[in-house]
Image: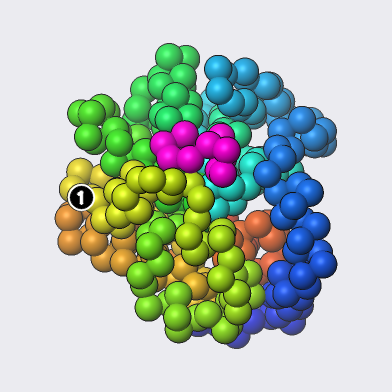
Amino acid sequence: MAEELSRRSKLIKYLVAEFNSNKRFQDKFTTESYGKSDMDVEYNYPDHLEAERIHMENFEMEKLTWKDSTSRWVVLHLHGGGYVGAMRKHYKQMAGLYSEVGGGATVITVDYRVAPEHTFPAALEDALTAYEWILDQGYSNDQIILAGDSAGGGLAMALVHALKASWRKLPAGIVAMSPWTDVTCSGNSYKDNFEIDPVFGNERSELVFENPYVGDADPRDPRISPLFGDFYGFPPMLIQVGTDEMLLSDSISVAEKAKSAGVKVRLSVYNGMFHVFQMAGTIMDESKQAWAEVKRFFEEI
C-alpha cells in the first residue's frame, strides 16, 4: 500500500511525533496516568451499544453488546501499552469499531494486570481467564476472534501459543495491529527505523527496551515473544503495520514464520504509517482502510 499520504494523514503523523518528542508532556503522561486504568471513565457509546462491567478476581473487563444483534462473533480485545500501560479510554472507541466491523459482534475488553507491579505471566494469565470466561458464557472457540494492538497483538499470539501447549481448542482468528512479537528487539527495523519512528524513535524507552514485564523470565519464551514459537496449527491472522515503525520487523518476521508453517496470514504494510495508526478511526484514510480490511477479515473467516 504505497499511496502518497494525504494532507490530513501527514498532519496527524506530525502531531503524533510532536507529542512523543515533547518530554514535558511525555513525562506527565507516563508518570501520572499511564499505569492507571480508564475502565471507570465514562464513555458515550452510540445508543445501539450497551456496556457492562465484568468483575474478575484479578482484573476488570468491559462487555460491549450491540442491541438486537445476530452476529455470531465475540471479540476478545487486548489493549496495547507495552505491558506497563493499563486500559485507556481510546480503547473503548476501538471496541465500538470492532463491534461495527464485526457486524454487531460482542466485544470483551480486558483490563489485564500490568508491570512493573505484575510481571510475566500476569497479563497472559488474565487473557487466558478471559478466554475461558467467554467459553463459559456458551460461545464456542470458533466464534472467538482475538484482537490486539502493540503488546496486545503480541499477547493475542502468546495466548494461542499457551492454548496450543495445553492442547486447548483455538480461536477462529487473530487481528494484530502493529503487534509486539519480539521483546528482545532483534529485528532490523529497531535500528533502521529508530530515527523515523514518530512514536518510539530517538530514545530507548522502557516501553520497548528492557521492558519490566519480562521480569526473571526468558524473553525468548513464546508466551512473551510469540515470534520464537511454533505457529503450526495457528488460526488465520490479519497483521497490519506501518512502514515507519521500529516494530515493523516483528510483523514481517511473524508473518513469514507463520506462513511457512501453513498458517493463512494476510500482512498489510501501510506506507508512511506509525505505530497503531488505526487509533485514528475514521479521521484518516489509512486508518479507514485498515478497519475496512478488518471487516473483510471477519467476513472471510
Q: For the view shown, which residue lies furthest in the front direction?
A: 216
237 displayed left or right of 177: left
- Residue 284 included in the magenta stretch of the image: no
Magenta-highlighted stretch: main secondary structure? loop
* Picture colour scheme: rainbow
Pick whichever, 243 or 201, lies toward us: 201
Pick whichever, 279 or 199, lies toward us: 199
- Amino acid tagged 1: Asp
- The answer to whether residue 168 is above or below residue 192 is above
Query: Residue at (48%, 60%) from the top-left corner?
Result: 210
Pick whichever, 69 or 245, lies toward us: 245
Q: Position of residue 133 (x, y in %)?
A: 46, 19
Q: Is residue 187 visible?
A: yes
Q: Position of residue 70 (x, y in %)?
A: 54, 25
**How many labels, in total?**
1
Q: Position of residue 102 (x, y in %)?
A: 53, 40
Element type at marker 1? loop
Query: Residue at (68%, 21%) from the top-left corner?
Result: 52
Identify the image quadrant of residue 184. bottom left
Residue marked by disc 1: 230
Q: Is residue 12 visible?
A: no
Mark 1 surroundings: few (<14), some (14-19) or many (≥20) residues within 10 A = some
The part of the chain drawn in magenta is 113-123
123 displayed left or right of 160: right
- Residue 119 included in the magenta stretch of the image: yes
Query: Residue at (32%, 50%) from the top-left corner?
Result: 218
Image quarter in which the C terminus is found: top left
Query: Residue at (77%, 30%) from the top-left corner?
Result: 40
- The answer to whether residue 199 is above or below residue 235 is below
- The answer to whether residue 75 is above or below residue 27 is above
Identify the image quadrant of residue 96. top right
Q: Position of residue 209 (x, y in %)?
A: 49, 64
